[in-house]
Image: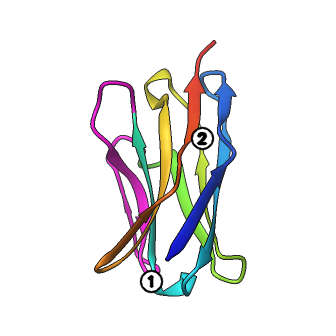
Amino acid sequence: QVQLVESGGGLVQPGGSLKLSCAASGRIFSDYAMGWYRQALGKQRELVARIIRGGSIDSGDSVKGRFTISRDNAKNTVYLQINSLKPEDTAVYYCNARNYPYDYWGQGTQVTVSS
């Protein structure tokens, strides 16, 4: 079992930045691919960025160049630095830990981009 707790969301103006954190506990963190997904109101959940065990990163097209994912295995934490925020980035951001067949989700953290 893996428990994921996200933090760092909030209200930010367009063009601003936030850094989300996801603290993991339970099974060996480094064995898991870690990712961030988001779900806007009325829309499907979509990939923001994920980082696999080997360090390769996969990002959604809408966030490339603005969002950066990183992980600190010593702290069992994955981060998402989000820059140049746009109103369309408003969503609940979820942390995910995956090591087939296991798939875990955090409770989500709200990011609202508005002036």
Q: Amino acid at mark 2?
A: Asn
Quick one: quadrant of the C terminus?
top right
Residue 68 percent location from the top left of the image = 54, 56
**Residue 88 in the image: x percent, y percent?**
43, 25
In which quarter of the view is residue 96 placed?
Answer: bottom left
Residue at mark 1: 53
Which is the main secondary structure of the residues drawn in magenta? loop
Residue at image position (57%, 26%) is: 112
Q: As drawn, is 1 to the left or to the right of 81?
A: left
Judged from the image, the secondary structure of the residue bearing numbered disc 1 is: loop
Numbered disc 2: secondary structure:
loop
Which residues are drawn in magenta? 40-63
Q: Earlier in the sequence, mark 1 or mark 2?
A: 1
* Magenta residue check for 57: yes
Could you tell me the amino acid type at mark 1? Arg
Cα separation, mark 1 vs mark 2, equals 25 Å
Name which residue lies at 48% across and 50% down.
Answer: 94
Residue 41 location (% of width, % of height): 38, 25
Report crowding for label 1: few under 14, some 14 to 19, many 20 or more residues within 10 A (C-alpha).
some
Reading the image, the residue beneath label 2 is: 83
Depth order, front residue of 109/68: 109
Nearer to the camera, 54 or 112? 112
Q: Quadrant of residue 79?
A: bottom right
Q: Please tell me which residue lies in front, 41 or 61.
A: 41
Give the answer, above or below, for where 18 lies relative to 40. Answer: below
